[in-house]
């Protein structure tokens, strides 16, 4: 082959920061020269504005998720270098950066994974158009979900808006493709290649400050954190192995999944899944291996059930686009959401006077993570008890969560707020939930140490303390711990 026949491809990494089961990377690796690239898009940093009767703005990316992303990029670059290549980091809008880079290296193809949210699809469309204008072929792939869109029983535009119907259909009629192994990687173009106009500097990894592009709150690890989440593909695979094989926790997942304290009541794979360090199909293959070698039971099924919940929201946002994020949600409900800065501030700070809600918010603020049970109750309290705009709560979670994903986060918030994919009432009785899931008040007192001197039933419901009991226990309501914002007896109907 002559030098003029040498092919060069760019792989544009987005939220797929891994080598395994990466179709875009595998396709680009078929070229003679490969340029792996990640683009720090300034539009994905800083704040996001939300329209509506009362417009508001929140920081898109908090310090913990920014740190996790930086660690994931650093890990991907290290793996690339071990394979004899590198990960190029560039700043700017992809629709400008990628065509310029393709011209610099003589690339004829750019491969990438598509993403479902409207903003992500808008960036993709602009980038594809720009590449085509320059004579570069864009090739997009799908690697976000357990089930590939082409393998769904119907086109994604026609899937059911009810999870149970969706789940039954895919379980009966869809397949899960086998995960692809990590490909062999061709080298970068070199200065000797006639198509390369300039040397290819790798570029500096983005700092946390650059990714946040705003005020950075302290993000040191809290000793009470459920798990020390470290970004990167190796960390993801280590966690998968530790949860399934080393700890053998999967066999009891169905029984433990509503836990509140500890590392192993759930798999906690979501940060790596959402940043793309881990493929859901890799998880599926590991569960199938576990079922063959250890046990197949309700718990092993339930982890795959949860992955299909994740799929459902990915396809829902792909189907409905911007309506997914509207105040009235997919149900287009006309709800007069309240707007009260003080009430929202108390909820966000974990000062509502309802310990189960406050412990949840304080864990989120301190660690960037929160159990599914805690998320549901915190969301229900804001939307159903305080009647504040659910999108503000979802936006707050967007900033704080280390495992934030637009489809899962906004889908679950809308679901709980009664404007999403379920017509049933989803208001939670947060007092009853605390009794059921935190009977010994271990979770509450872990995050609300000011209540640690109280017996469990009083730690969960401190408003029941008489003045004499407050003096005996050294907890004065309104001073050491807030009085409740609402009548606790008026909280929701405890649907699950």
Image (spheres, grey):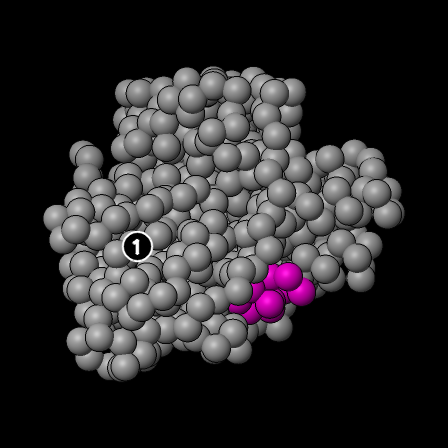
Horizontal and vertical percent for residue 168?
62, 20
In the image, taking residue 85 as reference, residue 471 lies left or right, namely right
Please say if 78 is above or below 397: below
In the image, taking residue 326 as reference, residue 403 lies left or right, namely right
Question: Is residue 217 at all visible to an observer of this figure?
Answer: no
Q: Residue furthest front?
A: 1
Please say if 284 is above or below 4: above
Horizontal and vertical percent for residue 334?
28, 20
Question: Is residue 26 at all visible to an observer of this figure?
Answer: yes
Q: Which element carries disc 1, helix, strand or loop?
A: strand
Horizontal and vertical percent for residue 244?
76, 54
- Front-most of residues 365 and 268: 268
The residue carrying pointer 1 sits among few (fewer than 14), some (14 to 19) or many (20 or more) residues within 10 Å by Cα, namely many
The quadrant the C terminus occupies is: top right
Residue at point 87%, 47% (across, down)? 294
- Front-most of residues 268 and 4: 4
Please say if 56 is above or below 47: above
Residue at point 31%, 20% (across, down)? 332
- Front-most of residues 278 and 68: 278
- Residue annotated with mark 1: 110
Residue at point 58%, 34% (across, down)? 308
**What is the span of residues highlighted in magenta in the rendered image?**
227-238
Residue 22 belongs to magenta span: no
Q: Quadrant of residue 163?
A: top right
Horizontal and vertical percent for residue 170?
59, 24
Q: Quadrant of residue 359?
A: bottom right
Q: Residue furthest right?
A: 294
Q: Residue furthest left?
A: 133
């Amino acid at each position: 082959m002559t030098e003029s026949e040498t092919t060069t491809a760019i792989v544009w990494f987005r939220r797929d920061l891994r080598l395994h089961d990466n179709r875009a990377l595998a396709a680009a690796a078929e070229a003679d020269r490969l340029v792996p690239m990640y683009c720090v898009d300034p539009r994905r940093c800083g704040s996001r504005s939300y329209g509506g009767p009362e417009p508001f703005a929140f920081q898109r990316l908090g310090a913990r998720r920014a740190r996790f992303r930086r660690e994931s990029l650093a890990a991907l670059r290290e793996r690339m270098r071990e394979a004899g290549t590198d990960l190029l980091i560039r700043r700017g809008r992809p629709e400008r950066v990628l065509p310029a880079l393709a011209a610099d290296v003589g690339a004829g193809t750019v491969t990438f994974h598509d993403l479902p949210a409207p903003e992500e699809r808008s960036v993709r469309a602009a980038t594809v158009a720009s590449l085509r204008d320059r004579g570069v072929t864009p090739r997009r792939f799908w690697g976000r979900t357990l089930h590939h869109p082409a393998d769904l029983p119907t086109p994604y535009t026609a899937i059911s808006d009810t999870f149970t119907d969706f789940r039954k259909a895919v379980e009966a009629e869809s397949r899960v493709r086998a995960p692809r192994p990590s490909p062999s990687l061709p080298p970068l173009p070199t200065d000797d290649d006639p198509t390369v106009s300039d040397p290819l500097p790798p570029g500096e990894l983005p700092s946390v400050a650059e990714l946040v592009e705003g005020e950075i709150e302290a993000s040191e690890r809290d000793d009470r954190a459920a798990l020390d989440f470290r970004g990167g593909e190796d960390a993801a695979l280590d966690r998968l192995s530790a949860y399934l094989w080393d700890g053998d926790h999967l066999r009891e997942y169905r029984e433990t999944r509503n836990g509140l304290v500890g590392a192993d009541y759930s798999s906690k794979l979501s940060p790596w899944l959402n940043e793309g360090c881990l493929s859901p199909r890799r998880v599926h293959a590991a569960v199938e291996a576990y079922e063959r070698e250890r046990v197949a039971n309700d718990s092993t099924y339930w982890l795959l059930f949860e992955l299909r919940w994740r799929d459902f929201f990915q396809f829902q946002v792909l189907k409905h686009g911007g309506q997914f994020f509207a105040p009235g949600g997919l149900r287009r409900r006309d709800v007069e959401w309240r707007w009260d800065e003080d009430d929202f501030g108390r909820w966000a700070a974990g000062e509502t006077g309802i310990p189960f809600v406050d412990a949840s918010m304080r864990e989120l603020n301190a660690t960037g993570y929160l159990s599914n049970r805690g998320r549901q109750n915190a969301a229900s309290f804001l939307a159903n008890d305080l009647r504040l705009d659910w999108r503000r709560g979802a936006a707050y979670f967007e900033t704080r969560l280390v495992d934030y994903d637009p489809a899962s986060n906004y889908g679950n918030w809308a679901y709980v707020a009664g404007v999403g994919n379920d017509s049933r009432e989803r208001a939670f009785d947060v007092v009853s939930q605390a009794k059921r899931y935190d009977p010994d008040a271990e979770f509450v007192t872990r995050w609300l140490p000011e209540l640690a001197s109280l017996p469990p039933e009083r730690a969960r419901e401190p408003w029941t303390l008489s003045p004499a009991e407050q003096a005996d226990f050294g907890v004065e309501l309104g001073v050491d711990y807030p009085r409740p914002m609402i009548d606790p007896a008026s909280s929701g109907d405890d649907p699950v």
